[in-house]
Amino acid sequence: MNTKPLICFGQQPCGFFPRRFLVAKFRTARRLQQEIGGEIVFFFHDSDHDPRETRTTLRDASTGHPVALNFAFENKLQRKFSPLHLKRVPAGWRESTARQLPAYVPARWVEAFRDNPAPTVAEFCLEMYRRMGLLEGIRVVRSSDSALRSAACEVADYFVDVPHGGEIVRARYAAGTLRLHEGGNVFIDLPPVPFGREQISPTRDTRLRWMQSVLHCTHYIAGAGEQKYLNMAETPEVTFSIRDAIDRSDEAYTDLPD
């Protein structure tokens, strides 16, 4: 167990320029570190598969009007069901998007975006956060890490990364069946295949205990949405803090550093 504070917060890749609520979590963690010391860990939940997570809302520098941009995807199956750490950045997307960015972000971030070589959606987002200086002095732990998955505790509700249709998809495991959710009450049942713990990632409701079984954090910074579903009683050893407020929390952060 930790003998010094370990301050943690988690987030899926949330835009190639991070949403402002994520920046608020970074700031809250740094403020808390100044108060109590210790280490900061960013739990990067790149196992999520929802393509809406990486939608990036920018504002036109001239008119102030918002525009939503996102990654392109190589095929429908990959877009809907592959985990973010395996969704590939298709050829041409980086260049075509970079041509649009001068209307929305400072030139420094346009160059950082254009030169980002990351091959997958999750890695591209993480590299942008790094280039924007957000990760300085912070340890990043990824939910896609097979060593982390193998070391984590067992949970009753989880997803499994399995091959399907030429891609790796993230299927929900329920009642002995691997299922893809098409929407509404429509599901695709996949044929049974053997799988190991290194293929498992938690659901929203089991993520905290799964993460904590490996990280053993002493403090956790929760976002506005997390407060509604986190079962804090599962981890009584953790002190929970609410992230600092920030305006336009769901929009992208593109400010230049002071």
Image (cartoon, rainbow, N blue to C red):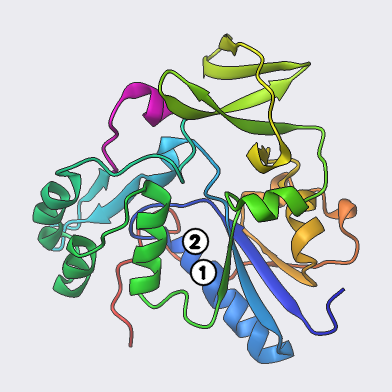
The residue positioned 63% from the left and 76% from the top of the image is 40
Across and down, in percent, residue 98 comes to: 14, 56
Of residue 92 and residue 132, the one placed in the foreground of this image is 92
Across and down, in percent, residue 127 comes to: 37, 64
**Is residue 152 one of those drawn in magenta?**
no
Residue 181, quarter of picture:
top right
Q: Dot 2 lies on which element?
A: helix
The residue positioned 52% from the left and 51% from the top of the image is 12
Q: Which residues are magenta?
A: 70-80
The residue positioned 76% from the left and 49% from the top of the image is 210
Residue 245 visible here: no
Residue 178, quarter of picture:
top right
Quarter the N terminus occupies? bottom right
- Vertically, is 135 above or below 67? below
Across and down, in percent, residue 151 comes to: 76, 53
The residue positioned 45% from the left and 58% from the top of the image is 249
Across and down, in percent, residue 167 comes to: 43, 27
Residue 4 visible here: yes
Of residue 251 and residue 100, the one placed in the foreground of this image is 100
- Vertically, is 187 above or below 38? above
Amino acid at the residue labelled 2: Phe
Amino acid at the residue labelled 1: Ala
Q: Residues within 10 Å of mark 2 (few under 14, many from 20)?
A: many
**Is residue 79 one of those drawn in magenta?**
yes
* Residue linked to disc 1: 24
Q: Dot 1 lies on which element?
A: helix
Q: CA distance from mark 2 to mark 1?
A: 5 Å
- Confirm or deny contact between disc 2 and disc 1 (CB under 8 A): yes
Q: Residues within 10 Å of mark 1 (few under 14, many from 20)?
A: some
- Residue 21: mark: 2
| Drawn side of residue 83 relative to residue 232, left or right | left
